[in-house]
Image (cartoon, grey):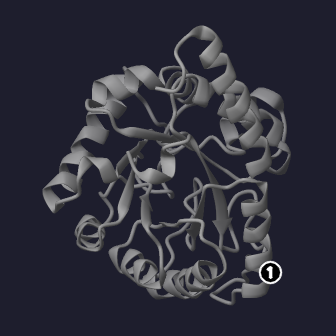
């Protein structure tokens, strides 16, 4: 298990994008014009609220989003990561599907690569991470952001996601990444129906068992559409539902959550771990 997740991590989202579904455009305009001072202020708030990791992204992977050229993605993220590493001791993750972006981010100071495609979009990204000794979050998705919500279907979501994550992990291991640097992410909302998302949240321990080993699991339910379908809230108003989902995730054994509202997730973690202790299990 990566050291960042030893105490049940809360990963704060820092999107340097103009088009992310709930927080795009906070400090970047249409191309690659990033307001570093504003971005650092936002990051400082996340750290103050208790973020254990800052996850920087320069390409939206929301359903329907279009791909961003790698040079533009680097321009949005590498200078920001360099500025963050000078200001904070909090580990930085780069949220990207592209090897060249991961490489630039690692050179700028990132210590984690978060690939929602499960190393499938650009397999060289695993080699880049391995050579740098970076931790890797191996996500699960079917299709690309443009297509992943076009009628997704699973006959047995836990079995199928576990099998596809296992295939991605094989790519990581073949590249030379040790298990103690690997984290799996079931990809809540990435090519999933609402019921698939509920199952993945409620059956985290089963998913871990089917994947095999004792790998850390990160869950990212933050402000996603399946919560809005339950509550009727728009993306910006889903933090309360996100806190509920994070509580369940930690209670069911997740090692980390990735969120926009760090303060709420920190409180969710406290409640979930107290309940696990009361059940006599403690943290897995």
Above or below, 201 against 74 in this view is above
Q: Name the foreground residue: 234 vs 91.
A: 91
- What residue appears at the point 52 percent right and 22 percent down from the top-left corner? 199
Q: Is residue 106 left or right of residue 49?
A: left
Residue 56, how many percent across, how many down? 58, 69
Above or below, 189 against 89 in this view is above
Q: Is residue 214 left or right of residue 238?
A: left
Residue 1 is at least partly visible in this image: yes
Q: Name the foreground residue: 127 vs 277.
A: 277
Element marked by disc 1:
helix
Residue 165, how many percent across, how many down? 31, 40
Residue receiving disc 1: 38
- What residue appears at the point 26 percent right and 47 percent down from the top-left corner? 179
Q: Dot 1: few (<14), some (14–19), or many (≥20) neighbours within 10 Å? A: few
Q: Quadrant of the N terminus?
A: top left
Check the image and name the residue furthest to the left.
Answer: 174
Residue 54, how many percent across, how many down? 61, 63
Above or below, 25 against 23 in this view is below
Residue 49, how many percent across, how many down? 78, 55
- What residue appears at the point 82 percent right and 36 percent down from the top-left corner? 240
Q: Is residue 253 left or right of residue 37?
A: left
Residue 142 is at least partly visible in this image: no
């Amino acid at each position: 298990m990566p050291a960042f997740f030893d105490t049940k991590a809360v990963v704060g989202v820092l999107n340097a994008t103009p088009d992310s579904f709930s927080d795009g455009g906070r400090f970047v305009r249409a191309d690659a014009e990033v307001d570093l001072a504003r971005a650092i202020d936002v990051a400082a708030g996340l750290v103050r609220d208790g973020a254990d990791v800052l996850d920087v992204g320069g390409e939206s992977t929301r359903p329907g989003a279009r791909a961003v050229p790698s040079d533009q993605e680097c321009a949005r993220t590498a200078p920001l990561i360099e500025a963050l590493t000078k200001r904070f001791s909090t580990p930085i993750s780069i949220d990207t599907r592209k090897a060249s972006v991961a490489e630039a981010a690692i050179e700028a100071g990132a210590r984690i690569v978060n690939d929602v495609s499960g190393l499938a979009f650009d397999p060289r990204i695993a080699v880049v991470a391995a050579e740098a000794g970076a931790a890797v979050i191996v996500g699960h998705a079917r299709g690309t952001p443009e297509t992943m919500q076009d009628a997704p279907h699973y006959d047995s979501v836990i079995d199928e996601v576990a099998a596809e994550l296992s295939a991605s992990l094989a790519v990581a291991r073949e590249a030379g990444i040790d298990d103690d640097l690997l984290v799996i992410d079931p990809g809540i909302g990435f090519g999933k129906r609402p019921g698939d998302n509920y199952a993945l949240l409620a059956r985290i321990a089963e998913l871990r068992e089917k994947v095999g080993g004792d790998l850390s699991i990160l869950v990212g339910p933050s402000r996603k559409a399946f919560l809005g379908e339950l509550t009727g809230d728009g993306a910006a108003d889903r933090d309360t539902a996100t806190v509920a989902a994070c509580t369940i995730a930690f209670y069911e054994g997740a090692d980390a959550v990735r969120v926009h509202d760090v303060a709420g997730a920190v409180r969710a973690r406290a409640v979930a771990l107290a309940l696990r202790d009361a059940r006599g299990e403690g943290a897995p």
